[in-house]
Image (tube, rainbow, N blue to C red):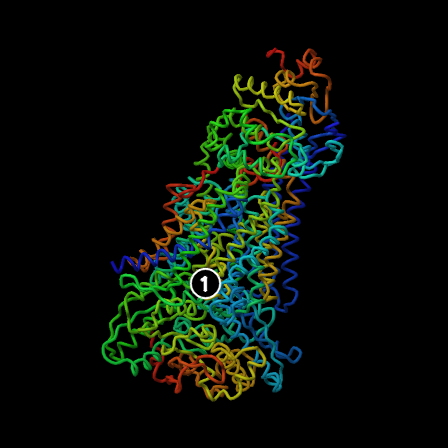
Amino acid sequence: MTVPTLKPRLLAATAVTAALALAVTACSSSAKSTSPGTTSPSASSGSPSSSAPSSGGSVTVGDSTTLSGAIAQLGQTGLDGVKMAIADLNAKGGVLGKTVKLVSADDNITPATGATEVRTMITQDHAIAMFGPVSSAVAAAQEQVTNQYSIPMFFYTSNDMGLMRGGANKYAFQFVPNTTMEPSAVADYFVKQAHGPITIATFAPDYSFGHDTVSGFIAALQRLHVNYRLVAQEFPPLSATNITSYLTAIVDSHPDYVFNAQFGSDLVNFTKQASSFGLFQKTKVIAMYDYNVLAALGSTTPAGSIGFDRAPFWAMPELGNFPQTFKAKYGDYPSEWAIMGYTAVQGWAWAVEKANSFSPSAVASALAGATVPTIRGNLTIQACDHQAEIPEYVGTIAAQPDPRYGVRLWNQPVFSAPFSDINPPCGASS
Amino acid sequence: MILDIQDLHVYYGESHVIQGISLEMDRGEAVALLGRNGAGKTTTMRAVAGLTPCARGRVRFDGQDITRWPAYRTARRGLSFVPSGRRAFDTLTVRQNLDLAARAWRFPRRGWDVARVLKVFPLLEELSGRRAGHLSGGEQQMLKIARGLLANPELLILDEPTEGLSPAVVKDLGRWLDLLRGEGLSILVTEQNALFALAHADRGYVLEKGRIRFASDASSLRSSDEIRSYLGVARLA
Amino acid sequence: MTTTSAGPRRALVVRSVVVPVVLVAALLLLGHTLSITNVLTLEEVLGLAVFAAATNLLLGYGGLVSFGQAAFYGSGAYLVGLSWLHHWMPFWAAFVLTPVAGGVIALAMGAIALRTRRLYFALLTLAFSELFFQLVNVRYDFTKGATGIFSVSMIPASLASPRTGYYFTAGVACVSLLILWKVTVSPFGLVLRATRENRERAEALGVSVYRHQLLAFVISGAFCSLAGALFVVWGQSTYPDLLNWTTSGQPLFMAVIGGMFAFLGPAVGALLYQFGYQYVTQHSHDWQLILGAALLLVVLFRPDGLAGVVSRQTWARLSRFARRAGRRGLPPEREPAAMETPIDGAGEAARVPGSPTP
Amino acid sequence: MHAFVVDLVSTLSTAGYLFIVSAGLTLVFGAMRVINLAHGSFYMYGAFLVTTLVGASSGARFWWAVPACAVAIGAVGAVVELGVMRRLYRSEHLTQLLATFGLLLIFADLALRLWGTGARTVSSPSPFQGRITIAGATFPSYDIAITVVAVLVGVGLWAMLTRTVVGWRIRAVVSDPEALAATGTNTHLLLTVVFALGAGLAGLAGAIVAPQTSIAPGIDQAIIVSAFIVTVIGGLGSIAGTALGAVLIGVAQTLGTRYAPNWASTVIYVVLIAVLAVRPWGLLGAAER
């Protein structure tokens, strides 16, 4: 009640607050070497990148991606690919004689979290290259940061066209087919299968990737003069657990084909429910039936439907025994995300060797327009938009499990749409 | 001795609400606990019943130390606490309220079952299908006492039974109390209405600020001017 | 009670002069000495501190748990983002408009939501913010859908420089906190607190609880919206997650962690939560386990938050002062003055097993 | 006729699904006034556990796996109640909410360790693997299983709450836990039982819904929002209200998808706001004091 006790208490509260602030910030800043007083991130970024190679024979790269929640599998297997690539690099003596270290974190599918993680990796861990996330929103936020700090950013899962469309981003590279390429490839395969007038329904998650992929597919059908009629278009929310009402709308429209832009667990969910509705009896579904989805579906896999995949290991003989090595290390065959993550690291390492420098600027310059040897063969990185010239794979789901892998995969031969066929002229935005 | 409280202390947070109360009552006695609002009557009874933790002191019931027992154990042992206010289970019917209490535990049989309770309170029979939440204050009081009896208690504790009741119902209540006393039941009543409580009790205690201020037999408390003025009952007399 | 009011008055001086001066000095000092990364984190924290303090006007002072604060936060961010995307108006105009927009949205939302009580209020506000979340998600052409709007040029070049951005945010945050604090000690704030402590009594005395709560809701909405605009200054982006229920939960966590019964508690909570969250997510893939366990430990063993340790008694004193100064003849509180439960009144608490009925 | 049957079946199976998931939530809320965010975790664990128990085998094993899941998750619920919830009954709702959110995070992380990041599936049990056609509309026969289980759960809960002494006690503990304790009921044990029952129902829901969906991390959070909407519309604590809420959301989602597909995901929130604006305690909820 008396003032003398009140006052110190309040001051104490303030002091505790201020001290906490100082302590916490000082604590987390202890690891850094950036000099205080620098006013712009780009000014400070020069120092970590140039100073890092000289510090103790190792360099650091970062990967902030989604490791929890509904799309964790994409993030985790992709990260495994990156890890393995780095382990392989180090086994061969590292890059320019330096060991490569990886820092990784879970972005919690939150752009702000992903961006902060990337910033911390760059400024505190002195990461000199970043490998990308799953979600396109997180990718966009992270790209802003890597751009500010002029650090090369390699996307290997998130394939939003928007990431590259801004153009003139010297530091961003895409090692995954983008949202135009992917549906174009599917349409190329599809046009060989479908004869006569057909009816099509589309089913896609309700966000930019889903909308872009569906409109890309329809645009490709028009370009190829397919005689089709759209009978239903549904956009259920991403990660919706109960899609009954969307599904009955599709089933009820009796399409010949359903083009589905879902992936991962959402696609498994769709397939389970659709097959219990008997959709697969008269309808073929075209969707991202990659290894993980096919493995999860097991015996309920719909034979005869069409799958597309950005890097199906079983149809890529150029991989050699990579899938087996990967399985030995991480417990399962590599997902498309793992292969693309591995390739992206190879691209970066090659460019460092080529430039004979870890300098982000030199690495980025060396990579633009270059042709890089990777586990999936030589890949050219387009100079104009930094898109790796990688193909997209399409195939029909087999009726029997593949004897080698015990999972129902695709019939041979698998169709591989060449990059030149599916990519619009460089610089043209869709 | 049916109840023996020694040096009971109870805290609510940091405030020392009960500051060392000692109280004894014999089997078959009816005792009134009096005091103004906030004197600590209810808290004492809650502590005895096991609804509020005792910080210090000891409570013995029928020779057994029940100080740290939870409420349901004291109830099963034969100490039935009837809380004040509208505390019927309002979403249940009257009959369900009674059945629930009758079947709550395999109580030692001391003669109370639903049929007998309904005989004592015939009105409850008429109301048996009604939701308890729709009962009047007096009816709820009746239901609560009936519920308390169904636990087949040796000691019945009534907390502020007259609170919010009309004078006519208070009179009924007095009748029920006398009836139960006649059955040989030990009864402990907390009351602000001192005259009512003392009219149906053998002895009384007066509480003030968590301590016992006076203790005496009912008639001398009733006649003491000091008590009357202290409890502010002069006007009522 | 005949204590002179000199004590509390001097306390007020301490609170209204000393504390702000110390804080502003600390913030200036930190902005000058910290590394860029930490300056940026602190900038984010300051925005969140406004968000949490504005939310706490409802939570700690009004006893209203709103689970829809993201609706204001996200609206503020989207107002700036969409203004840039569709060339509606320059950044500064949008920035100044955000509190107005937040207030208007809060007025509409509160007018409906405040008809309900406690949990239903929490869930109805949640429904509103989820509605906003879904609207932003499905209007892809207008809002860029689930991807969100990302561009450095969303904010003026001057603010894009981290330290300038920090000083700007710190300035806005300090002024906002000062205004919010003034609100809490104004007669309005005291009546609001009275409605939290005993709604029925306040109503019996002729106070329109609904109107006071609505005004508090509008003020809170305005500042949450401003905090959303500060997020854009920090992140140069806006995306649907800012409207999601997890975002609504953040300021509530912060208030609980820091202590909702001290004015600066939520701000301290913002600091601890954000640094803690970042530290954990960056250093462990098992951040969910660690954060969840930490949350559980705080809730089980420090339910009144860290600031509660310091300021619980201070709070009790201030409440007593508030009662004397503000309520003018409200009957005295019954002892014991147990910690009020913000969602439930004491009436509900009494119905929980083993809790006291005073 | 055809469209009507399609919509009706879609509504019923959606409602059945939502009801099973929400029943435990409303039961726990009714008895202990706790909003349990970890309810979704119990659901997810039930689903994951059934995939482990059934594995690649088809059919028959499912029928004993489901009750096993319910019991196992119920036991987990009892442990959670004894370890955490019991200490929080005196706290305000917000504190309880935070605690259950902490539990949700912990369970999510542990699930990643126990079952990995990938999606898992389990096939429908033997009598319900095919399809049924009514008036030209074909739908999965497992929808019938879901609907039947939903009805059984609903009737079972209703009978328990209205016909059994335990049910009366559960209702009485809502009105007045102290008075209930004074009648000799061990209210602490009762609340443990209720919480375990709620968790067991969530586990049952996860297990029974599993053949219809994919089971992957994140379904805990995805389900909890829908479950809340359903229970709140119906009135927290009311089993009948939850059933009504489930049907209402089923109708809203079905019609929304049919007539305004772009707005389908927003429709349910509009319904929720409209219901609460008119009836602030939900359709069948008791007005709170």
Lateral position of residue C300 relative to residue C96, left or right: right
Q: Position of residue C108 (x, y in %)?
A: 38, 44
Q: Quadrant of residue B21?
A: top right
Circle 1 residues within 10 Å: few <14, some 14–19, many ≥20: few
Q: Position of residue A195 (x, y in %)?
A: 25, 81
Q: In the figure, C207 relative to C178: above or below? A: above
Residue kind at label 1, given as amino acid type: Ala
Note whether residue A424 is visible. Answer: yes
Q: In the figure, B131 relative to D236: above or below? A: above
Q: In the figure, C173 relative to A212: above or below? A: above
Q: Position of residue D256 (x, y in %)?
A: 32, 56
Name the residue rendered at 50%, 44% in the picture. Answer: D30
Note whether residue C175 is visible. Answer: no
Residue bearing mark 1: C157
| Foreground residue among D227 and C143 | D227
Q: Position of residue D24 (x, y in %)?
A: 50, 51
